[in-house]
Amino acid sequence: MNLLNQQVRHEHFGDGTVVDCTASHVRVRFPVGEKRFAFPDAFGTYLSLTDPETARLVEDLKKEVEKKRKAKRRALDKQRAEELAERQRELERERLLRSQAFSPASQACFWCDGEELEKVFAEWRVFTGLRKSGQDAGKPVRLVRMGNNSACLITEREQGMAEEDRRIAGVFLADETFVGKLCDDGYIPGHPKYRLRFSEEESQRLLFWNYYCDERYPLNTTWNRGRHRYFHNIWMAQILRDVVSLRAETEGEELAKEFFQHFCELNHIDGEKIPPPNGSLIRQKAQAS
């Protein structure tokens, strides 16, 4: 806006003439000398324009500038609030990680198939699912037992395959910063290093029901509903130990060993004293014999 040579009035300095105007300041020549004011803030506060039409235009500009400033302040306040909330979440996460109590079943197994299976291994994260009922219906399930010591076991059962033939397709450790209690989006992110996807041959030799057992129904091999189950720490250690054996003298042996050792350390498991698997399939065979 060009205000050059516009006539203005100041309460103390009297009448003056605008001699310079920028986007942020205006300079006015008074009988006592030149004075510099903030633009457009000074108009309507310290300065008043003699010309009514110009005064109206400046007032409209002033309102527009103030509107933008308020929007900027709101955005800044929102950013600060989000940063504070994130910092509080980080502090809570750190507190929970330090005070984490180890559950004997802080692992989880998931039923994935089709496109979802490929997505899990492409992104190395798994969705816990949505609550079906209650006041939190429709919200992501929080697996509160899980933390940075937990592993996610990915299982699959192809169409037409018997449930007892359910296979283990892969496994990954949760990211070091993961805390189940604070998981709002339902996704468990994988550790950047400790992640294994099994070949078809490996998967066929890693049957889920050789390890998993519902103690209430020890001979049952049924997964009636839901996409996940909590999984005992020892069972997960048994699987990782067997993977080490499967990958002996292969390219994947070293990572399998590191994964197994790291998992045992995180979960306070003596890798030399892990019992053999005793899942439902093994119990069925034992009873049959």
Image (cartoon, grey):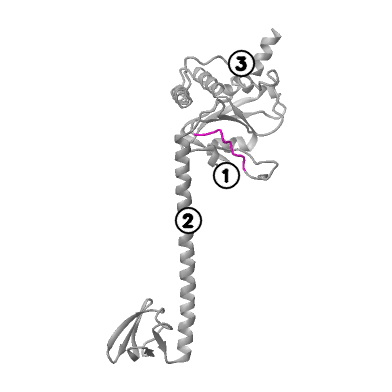
Q: Which residue is mark 1?
A: 185
Q: What amino acid is at disc 3?
A: Asn
Residue drawn at x 56%, y 29% is 107
Residue 273 in percent (x, y) is at: 49, 14
**Is 18 on the left-hand or right-hand side of 112?**
left
Image position of 49 with respect to 286: above or below: below
Q: Quadrant of residue 283?
A: top right
How far apart are the alpha carbons under marks 3 and 2?
51 Å
Residue 25 in percent (x, y) is at: 35, 78
Label 2: element kind: helix
Lower position in the chain sequence, tag 3 or tag 2: 2
Q: What amino acid is at disc 2?
A: Ala
Lower position in the chain sequence, tag 1 or tag 3: 1
Magenta residues (range) = 140-147
How far apart are the alpha carbons under marks 1 and 3?
34 Å
The C terminus lies in quadrant: top right
The N terminus lies in quadrant: bottom left
Lower position in the chain sequence, tag 2 or tag 1: 2
Q: Which residue is mark 2?
A: 81
Residue drawn at x 48%, y 51% is 85
Label 3: element kind: loop
Label 1: element kind: loop
Q: Are marks 3 and 2 in contact (CB under 8 Å)?
A: no
Q: Foreground residue, 148 or 189?
A: 148
Residue drawn at x 37%, y 76% is 24
**Main structural element of the magenta stretch: helix, strand or loop?**
loop
Give the numbered dot on residue 278. Answer: 3
